[in-house]
Amino acid sequence: MADDNKPIKYMRYAIGEILLVVIGILIALSINNWNETRKDQLRLKNHYVELLNELNSDIDNLKFNIENVRKINNQTFEISEFINFSQSKIDTTKIVDALFGAEPYAFFSISNSVYTTLLSNGDIQLIENEQLKNALSIYHDVKSWDWTAHNGNLKDAIERYSYYVHKFLPPLLFRDNYIKGFSKNLKNEKFSTYITNKKPKIEWERLKNDEEFGTIISQLITYRVFQLNFYNQQLHNINKMIDLIQTELK
């Protein structure tokens, strides 16, 4: 074998076989990696489409909520005008409506199921656009929403306002107001006929001159202005995220 170089030929053959096996393995790994990458991209695309659906839904809900806050704040401004400016004749019906209209608490809850899924299964790492990833993280930060738009100051002011108004206005006025408000759903109920025709006696001057009540009204307006500002900022942020996602899909 030494004489006719068979060992060298055998070594060359063996090395060739090894190279072919290595190349085959590398090709198989490349194909597998390509398939995995393709699956990841398809999964990410589906996440992007679902995110777009959620964000567009949030836009609609947020706009609706902004309009609610505006309406509530407009009612609060009516009360503020009544308190701070002299009026020769008080439109009691208008002020009573405002007293009821200034009480609700408009609350917006973001959609977060897709983002929660991205975090739980680790697919958040598939997003290579750091700007988009950071924007999603900030937007879905519950603490940010609770601290800014759903802050305890506004809730506290509404609770104090509600307590004060319920103490000030006659009970029958509350009863009649809620019966009228739900009249369509309660028309077959016996108590739906218990609406008084007499106008209740209200001490308007006492309400007008109450400093504590005036302070509460000012706080309600202030905190709701902060709430509106934050909601409008979030609308801008949502539209920015939608643009980034659409760019990624392209």
Image (spheres, helix red, strand yellow):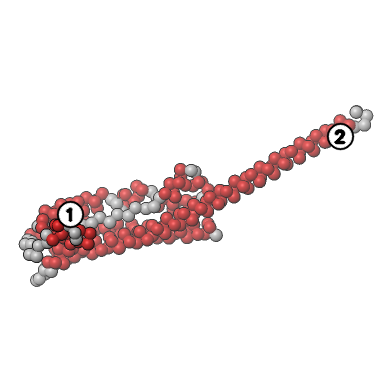
Extreme bottom residue here?
88
* Residue at which label 1 appears: 161
Q: Can residue 233 be seen in this view?
A: no
Task: Point out residue 221 in the picture as x, y percentages from the top left corner.
Answer: 23, 59
Secondary structure under tag 1 reads helix
Q: Quadrant of residue 166?
A: bottom left
Mark 1 residue crowding within 10 angstroms, few (<14) / some (14–19) / many (20+): many
Mark 2 residue crowding within 10 angstroms, few (<14) / some (14–19) / many (20+): few
Mark number, residue 9:
2
Residue positioned 90% across, 32% down in the render: 5
Distance, label 2 to label 1, CA atoms, is 97 Å
Task: Point out residue 113 in the picture as x, y percentages from the top left corner.
Answer: 42, 49
Work out which quarter of the rendered image holds the N terminus and state it: top right
Residue positioned 39% across, 52% down in the render: 111
Q: Is residue 71 visible?
A: yes
Residue positioned 28% across, 61% down in the render: 68
Work out which quarter of the rendered image holds the C terminus and state it: bottom right
